[in-house]
Amino acid sequence: MRLLTHNMLSSNIKGVTNGFPLLIEAEKVVEKAVDFNEDFLKNMFAKIEWKALVDASKTMGYAELPDNVESSMLDSDEFLQKFHHALLELHLEEGALVCPETGRKFPVSKGIPNMLLHEDEV
Amino acid sequence: MQILCIMLSDIAQIRLVSSHPEVYDPCDDSFALVDALLADRANLLEHHPSICLEIGCGSGYVITSLALLLGKEASGAHYMATDINPHAVGVTRETLEAHGCHAELVNTDIALGLEKRLARSVDVIVVNPPYVPTPEEEVGCFGITSSWAGGENGRSVIDKILPVADKLLSEKGWLYLLTLTANNPLEICLLMRKKGYASRIILQRSTEEESLHIIKFWRDLDTLLEVKESMVLNKTDNRTVTESLPFPSFSVWRNLSRNFN
Ligand SMILES: C[S@@+](CC[C@H](N)C(=O)[O-])C[C@H]1O[C@@H](n2cnc3c(N)ncnc32)[C@H](O)[C@@H]1O
């Protein structure tokens, strides 16, 4: 699971008002090289919750992202490379995503998060 | 020889598609959907999709084919797929890897967990839903049953997917939906029309057992205005929207005829 996906997931348990961002419990992180695509990054930038991405990448052992961003940084190649790496190349292989409100864990196994809810959570 | 190889590599290869006793193997419906995507390939490339999502990926045959057929020419595309069946997302992962592709996978009910943050962000949604008319109890059962069980008229899951697709699709977003005649595809077009979508049947195929349609939907300002106007009319003359809309809907035919021109 890429951090892009993490940035798009929230906890949907009944009664939870703020299920984003999910906390990450990382047991196994892998890095996979992905072709760099500037247009994609520029497209996604506006959709990304930046703080969630910074915190998530720190949990995954990557602390190079700046805490604060503005769109002018998209002109910097150095910034784009870091953004690319954090968003697309870091994968959570094994671990869990934790609902910030209830502590409920959504397991991640073989890189696939299980977001299915139990009957009493819907 | 080289040209032949390139042509063959345009979609997923059956021998590389992984399988599991509890997961739907690629079948006539899967092939029809991929054929429709292939036929629409030039439009898809021109569309420059950022995020493509398959709901109910099963073996992964369709999402892998989509990634392959768009290939390097759509290098800015990011692929995602969901399935309610945990075995299916596992098999999809293997199928993708065997073809050297990547899609982000989520084991979930339709797009639960993604709906909030992914709203208005998906440029292409592809769905081959469980469409077989069955008793309602069979819908959403775990394992292989969930791959076909569609409840009354085969519409239970489809009718849940439509509002989610509406929420997720970007302004320019397209939805490709496979349906069976028993699902009443024209009524589905009408339902989507009320949400402001135009539609076109882009592929029709009859097999021994079933007659399949692949419908493409997109947001259309004219459709939206027509619907709004008819709603205003309805307020004054007290009819329901359904009554005032011609059936089959105008835009379906308009677009069908456009297609033939
Ligand atoms: C007809 S099969 C299609 C599989 C594959 N896309 C293909 O074309 O070969 C339908 C798939 O939808 C999945 N499915 C059924 N209900 C679902 C739901 N509520 N959310 C997500 N996936 C679902 C099934 O597990 C199955 O894999």
Image (cartoon, grey):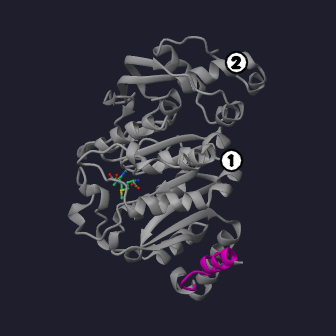
* Percent position of residue B195, x then y: 57, 66
Task: Give residue A106's mark.
Answer: none
Front one among A98 and B129: B129
* Percent position of residue B171, x then y: 65, 54
Residue type at mark 1?
His
Helix or strand or loop: what does disc 2 sit on?
A: helix
Relative to B107, does residue A82 appear above or below in the rendering?
Answer: above
Chain letter of the residue carrying label 1: B
Spot the residue most to the front: B1
Task: Read off the magenta span.
Answer: B246-260
Q: Label 1: few (<14), some or many (≥20) within 10 Å?
A: some
Residue type at mark 2?
Phe
Q: Label 2: few (<14), some or many (≥20) within 10 Å?
A: some
Task: Give residue B48's mark.
Answer: 1
Helix or strand or loop: what does disc 1 sit on?
A: loop
The residue indicated by pointer 2 is A79
Spot the residue most to the bottom: B237
B251 part of magenta stretch: yes
Relative to B119, is A29 on the left or the right?
left
Q: Decide if residue A37 is in sight here.
A: yes
